[in-house]
Image (cartoon, rainbow, N blue to C red):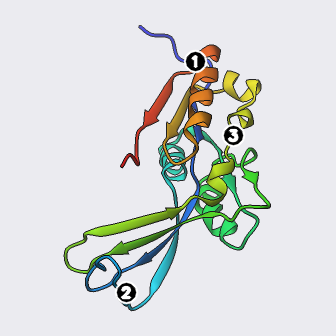
């Protein structure tokens, strides 16, 4: 019989925090074309934030590390994470960059989409936000490709040195 773990698992997500502006036009625009949608909705998102939210909602102690701006979208970006109990103490507030935002166009009827992400503060996510204490307290480090590659690479190397397994979701790869 396997002994029970002495501490609860802890997931640390190093990655993107984005606000999605979702519009639902009747058809997606062609190159150079403007289409109208009846409105839009704002939703917190980003591959990293979505991973942290899913981990927390599954009952795992979760920490999010990344960056947001100091603009009005910053609150929208982290509100669901905060409500879900994700530890946000290491989320950097980048004063010279806006919170990342995505324009998400979803064609009514077909569900086909087009997405463009304005990287914004995600470019400020830095592996040095992962302190040795955080890595020692981490059961698994989760990464994805919406923050600078070099920072992901450094985070993965440091996690390996500390003995924490790394999960890399390669999305979004074009």
Quadrant where the image shows the N terminus: top left
Residue 125, image x, y percentages: 67, 45
Q: Nearer the viewer, mark 3 or mark 1?
A: 3
Q: Which residue is mark 3?
A: 126
Residue 74 lies, with reference to residue 28, above or below; the image says above
Which of the 4 quarters of the picture holds residue 24? bottom left
Mark 3 and mark 1: span between their CA atoms? Answer: 17 Å
Q: Is 122 in front, or is 133?
A: 122
Residue 34 lies, with reference to residue 146, above or below; the image says below
Q: Which residue is mark 2?
A: 34
Q: Residue furthest right?
A: 95
Which circle marks residue 160 in the picture?
Answer: 1
Q: Are marks 2 and 1 in contact (CB under 8 Å)?
A: no
Left or right: 6 with respect to 128?
Answer: left
Q: Secondary structure at mark 3?
A: loop
Residue 2, image x, y percentages: 45, 10
Residue 153 lies, with reference to residue 109, above or below; the image says above
Q: Secondary structure at mark 2?
A: loop
Q: Earlier in the sequence, mark 3 or mark 2?
A: 2
Q: Is 79 in front, or is 149?
A: 149
Residue 137 in sight in this render = yes
Q: Secondary structure at mark 1?
A: helix
Q: Earlier in the sequence, mark 2 or mark 1?
A: 2
Identify the residue at horizontal 64%, vertical 16% (top origin).
Answer: 162
Q: Nearer the viewer, mark 2 or mark 1?
A: 2
Residue 155, image x, y percentages: 62, 29
Q: Residue furthest left?
A: 110
């Amino acid at each position: 019989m396997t002994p029970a773990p002495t501490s609860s698992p802890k997931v640390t997500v190093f990655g993107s925090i984005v606000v999605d502006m979702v519009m639902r036009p009747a058809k997606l625009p062609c190159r150079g074309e403007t289409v109208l949608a009846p409105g839009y909705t704002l939703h917190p998102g980003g591959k990293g934030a979505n991973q942290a939210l899913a981990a927390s909602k599954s009952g795992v102690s979760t920490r999010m590390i990344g960056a947001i701006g100091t603009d009005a979208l910053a609150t929208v970006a982290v509100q669901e994470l905060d409500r879900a109990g994700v530890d946000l103490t290491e989320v950097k507030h980048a004063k010279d960059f806006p919170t990342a935002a995505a324009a998400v166009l979803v064609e009514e009827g077909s569900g086909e989409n087009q997405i463009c992400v304005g990287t914004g503060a995600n470019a400020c996510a830095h592996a040095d936000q992962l302190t040795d204490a955080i890595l020692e307290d981490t059961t698994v480090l989760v990464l994805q490709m919406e923050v600078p590659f070099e920072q992901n690479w450094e985070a993965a190397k440091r996690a390996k040195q500390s003995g924490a397994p790394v999960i890399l979701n390669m999305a979004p790869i074009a």
